[in-house]
């Protein structure tokens, strides 16, 4: 359990470069407006097949993407207390996805495969570690990925890749519901 203190927290991995420190306020403001307890930076230009949708409510905008990045994450304290920390049984990449799945199931974030990010995140943050990553993509990495994939399927009754991307209509309905909670 987390102690009282900050109501807003971030995970920032060591290969992230902050280009604009207002990024923290932008995430807090967007999350507060849309009543989200979890968001991910997802504006990685190198990710292929990243389906994007922009949702606008007044001056606030969300970029909803089909790809997840755990390099920079926003958490509302009460949401993190309810959902819990990352499951340490997941190693190398899938721990972020499984964690995001739980936030979605609990209603603290947008549905899985429609990951919420601020619009313009690529202007505020940059992943500078892709070329210099310490993640080994060899046999141990692949074994960990297989183990994590099996664990997800056993826990949730389906493989992670079988979790469908919600329709645009479902995403809009979800966000309108969150906005009506105000």
Image (cartoon, rainbow, N blue to C red):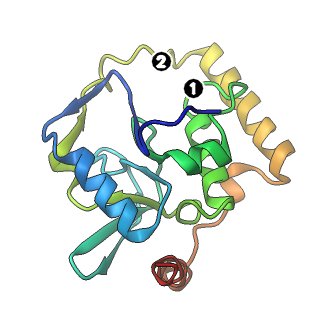
Q: Is residue 6 left or right of residue 97?
A: left
Residue 163 on image: x %, y %: 68, 60
Callout 1 secondary element: loop
**Residue at x-position 53% and y-position 65%:** 110
In the rendered image, the vertical position of residue 116 relative to residue 121, given as above or below: below
Residue under numbered circle 2: 135
In the rendered image, the vertical position of residue 44 relative to residue 150, given as above or below: below
The mark that comes first in sequence, 1 or 2, is 1
How crowded pointer 2 is (Cα within 10 Å; few <14, some 14-19, many 20+) is rated as few
In the rendered image, the vertical position of residue 125 relative to residue 3, given as above or below: below
In the rendered image, the vertical position of residue 57 relative to residue 120, given as above or below: below
Q: Is residue 42 left or right of residue 120?
A: right
Residue 138 on image: x %, y %: 56, 15
Whether residues under marks 1 and 2 lie with C-beta atoms below 8 angstroms apart, the answer is yes
Q: Nearer the viewer, residue 72 or 151?
A: 72
**Residue at x-position 58% and y-position 73%:** 166
Looking at the rendering, which quadrant does residue 13 occupy? Answer: top left
Q: Is residue 30 left or right of residue 88?
A: left
How crowded pointer 1 is (Cα within 10 Å; few <14, some 14-19, many 20+) is rated as some
Residue under numbered circle 1: 92
**Residue at x-position 52% and y-position 86%:** 169
């Amino acid at each position: 359990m987390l102690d009282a203190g900050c109501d807003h927290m971030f995970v920032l991995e060591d290969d992230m470069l902050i280009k604009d420190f207002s990024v923290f306020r932008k995430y807090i403001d967007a999350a507060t407006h849309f009543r989200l307890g979890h968001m991910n930076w997802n504006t990685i230009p190198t990710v292929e097949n990243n389906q994007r949708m922009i949702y606008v409510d007044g001056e606030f905008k969300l970029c909803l993407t089909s790809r997840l990045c755990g390099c920079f994450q926003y958490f509302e304290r009460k949401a993190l207390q309810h959902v819990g920390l990352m499951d340490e049984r997941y190693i190398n990449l899938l721990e972020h996805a499984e964690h995001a799945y739980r936030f979605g199931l609990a209603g603290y974030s947008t549905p899985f495969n429609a990951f919420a990010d601020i619009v313009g995140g690529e202007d505020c943050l940059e992943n500078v570690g892709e070329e210099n990553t310490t993640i080994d993509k060899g046999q141990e990495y692949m074994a960990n990925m297989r183990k994590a994939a099996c664990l997800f399927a056993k826990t949730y009754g389906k493989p992670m890749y079988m979790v469908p991307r919600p329709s645009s209509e479902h995403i809009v309905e979800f966000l309108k519901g969150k906005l009506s909670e105000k």
